[in-house]
Image (tube, coloured by chain):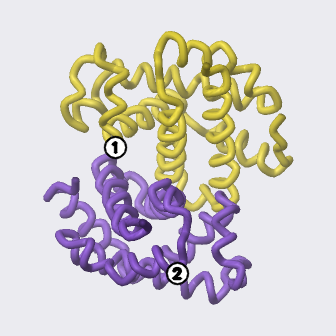
Chain colours: A purple, B yellow
Amino acid sequence: MLTAEDKKLIQQIWGKLGGAEEDIGAEALWRMFHSYPPTKTYFPHFDLSQGSDQIRGHGKKVVAALGTAIKNMDNLSQALSELSNLHAYNLRVDPPHFSLQFLSQCLQVVLATRLGKEYTPEVHSAVDKFMSAVAAVLAEKYR
Amino acid sequence: MVNWTAEEKQLITGLWGKVNVAECGGEALARLLIVYPWTQRFFSNFGNLSSPTAIIGNPKVQAHGKKVLTSFGEAIKNLDSIKKCFAQLSKLHCDKLHVDPENFRLLGDILIIVLAANYGKEFTPACQAAWQKMVRVVAHALAHEYH
């Protein structure tokens, strides 16, 4: 799936985020809630108003997990094993919502708005593939 | 009938007014073929699609992208009757082109990313939400006449 070139591009792009990870995570979530209202059903316990501490905190968590995944692209299954368990047994987010692009799409939109031309077709492709791979791992233990 | 709020219409038509249809359409179609290579199955007579560079530089890809996005523009002019507007195109995609409607969703999402890359901060969450709805409605309309 992920070629050596894809991995290199992903690491490069991640490197360019320079500490904005928390903002990016929060913005991606906010966009997701706005564009795909059904995703809010998984957060009834959250204050979902714009800029809420919970959205920021959760965005930071999500991006940190993606950061871990990026450091372990050769072994995603193991690196994300705990998260995989969590999603399968506790959170039980509808699997198509993973392989579907909701969060991936919104994350990519955030990256694209910040990187502009630098979000080249090659980078776009690599990130899309990477998010698919992460989604597949998180859905591994569903049944 | 789709319910568009005044704000949604403004966000859609406002951004559309700035879009270079030829460039944007070409870019969106090229990215579709690059990011989801299996979509190349519909374009076997387009010549060289062997690499991202080849795809981006391919004049047939650019021309077809422009055609597709121009058509999209028609939907924007007819926000209150998109299904009707696309009835013929829907039949064409089903009966002649044999395109799985899933591909419309893929192209729609790619278009959103192209807009995001081109308009940066201006492509606000509210703007994205309006456009995600737009591409969903277009995809739905194009699939409507399938049988």
Quick one: A142 or B111, which is closer to the camera? A142
| Local secondary structure at mark 2 | helix
Circle on res. A90:
2
Residue type at mark 2 is: Asn
Q: Please name the residue shown 41% across and 36% down the image.
A: B27
Q: Is residue B16 visible?
A: yes
Residue type at mark 1 is: Val
Instruction: Residue A74: give x, y in percent of width and height.
Output: 17, 69
Residue underneath mark 1: B35
Instruction: Residue A10: give x, y in percent of width and height.
Output: 27, 64
Q: Quadrant of the N terminus of chain B?
A: top right
Q: Given the current orientation, which residue lies at the most extreme top position?
A: B96
Q: Quadrant of the C terminus of chain B?
A: top right
Q: Is residue A20 visible?
A: no
Mark closer to the observer (2, 1)? 2
Establish if B3 lies above or below A139. above
Q: Please name the residue shown 22% across and 76% down the image.
A: A72
Q: Please name the residue shown 54% across and 17% down the image.
A: B94
Establish if A121 lies above or below A112. above
In the drawing, does residue B11 fall left or right of residue A17? right
Q: Please name the residue shown 58% across and 23% down the image.
A: B70
Question: Image quadrant of residue A43?
Answer: bottom right
